[in-house]
Image (cartoon, rainbow, N blue to C red):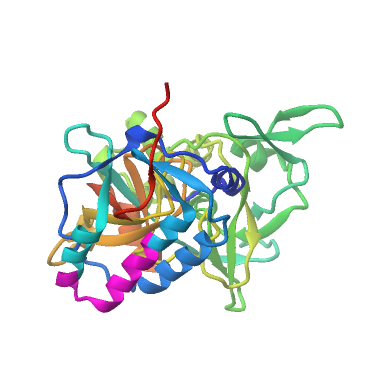
Amino acid sequence: MPSVKPYILLFALILSGCSTPKHSVFISDNIPDFKEKGTSTSLNPALTKHIKYLQNFPQETTVEIGEKIYSYAELVLSLKHFQTLQNNYTAEELSIKIQEDFNVYQARGNNASSHNVFITGYFEPIFKGSSSPSDIFRYPIYTTPPDLITKKDSVGTKVFRQADTSSLLPYYTRKEIETQSVLQGYEAAYLKDPIDAFVLHVQGSGKLEYPDGSLHSFGYAANNGHNYKSIGRFLVDEGKMNLQETNMDSIRAYLNTHPKEQNSVLHHNPRYIFFTEKGNKAPVGSNGIELTAERSIAIDQEVLPWQTLYFLESTLPTIARQTPDNFSSFMLAQDSGAAIKGAGRVDVFWGNGEKAKDIASHMKERGRLYFLIKKGLGKPRIPTP
């Protein structure tokens, strides 16, 4: 899905050296072969960007992973060591070297016995749009309004509406924004289909093709503070759709054939995203890193570490399967999402275009998520009395 990106909250947590809960990961004795299957995108550029981003932070900052505490400097060293191996060894040799040189952690996942994670996908949509309204382009997306106020506390970041000089109220819901014209004057662009606009919100970023043929990227800027609610789950609970066939294509088809239900379904999700225009740049994740197709994933960065290299084992959805249909790839945690919660959820970024849309829209797979840290690094965690 991704992806709704609480960038300010994550940035504050990162700077504070937030801990990864001990129960969310463990050193695995079920070591995969670390051979990639089904991926075509080079890892090296994405890895270089990740290392560069991690080096921007004070290198003495620490993060707790499993039973150890690692400094950012050590995690940079770990990533660089892997990059050196990857650039100098064959796939067969790399698999052996990883087992020799790295501790292999695993996300505990949703199932205590199998440690499976649930894997979905997201993509960068491209829709027809315009910088000005017309009879065709009638559905706006908005920039961050000035009355949106964020406040941090021990729980996280909360969003309010500045009603007057002394009053803070919950921010408007999706329904209120779309039916009461409360944000008039803050339009960033216009789309011709309200479902397109909704998908843009769910994905968190995308491109609009204007009538002159130019492409304009729009990225996540803020949200209205309301929790994400799945309209797919809503349609299943209402008996309108079958869980197994629920994806964005089938939801769109249902809404197009039941236009009178469209508003009530879309407004079931009160969460609303505000956007900023980014020219024609590649999409950026919540960590501020340019996303790479088939290499960037969204995880819950409050329970799993974003600073390490991941290895994901899964299968492709039926619509995208070839031979073999297994999918395994080294990944980097460069994004987050309102629906990506806990150690058992992963969202894979598939890029843009029809193929990316098809895979992302249909991906509801089970798999395993590992990550690597070079042996010999870190200090033992001191148990809490």
Percent x, y of residue 123: 42, 60
Say which residue appears at 72% left-offset and 28% top-offset.
Answer: 169
Per the picture, the main secondary structure of the magenta-coloured stretch is helix
Say which residue appears at 62% left-offset and 46% top-offset.
Answer: 8
Percent x, y of residue 257: 40, 47
Q: Quadrant of residue 67?
A: top left
Percent x, y of residue 350: 37, 62
Question: In the picture provided, is 54 more to the left or to the right than 368?
Answer: right
- Confirm whether the magenta stretch covers residue 86: yes
- Confirm whether the magenta stretch covers residue 264: no
Q: Nearer the viewer, residue 294 or 87?
A: 87
Relative to 247, is 382 above or below?
above
Question: In the picture provided, is 380 more to the left or to the right than 175?
Answer: left
Task: Pick out the residue farthest to the left.
Answer: 323
Task: Pick out the residue farthest to the right.
Answer: 165
Q: How many marks?
A: 0
Q: Quadrant of residue 215?
A: bottom right
Question: In the picture provided, is 47 more to the left or to the right than 271?
Answer: left
Is any part of residue 284 visible from this angle?
Answer: no
Say which residue appears at 35% left-offset and 48% top-offset.
Answer: 346
Q: Nearer the viewer, residue 380 or 350?
A: 380
Say which residue appears at 42% left-offset and 21% top-offset.
Answer: 385
- Residue range in magenta is 78-93
Is any part of residue 100 visible from this angle?
Answer: yes
Q: Nearer the viewer, residue 39 or 279?
A: 39
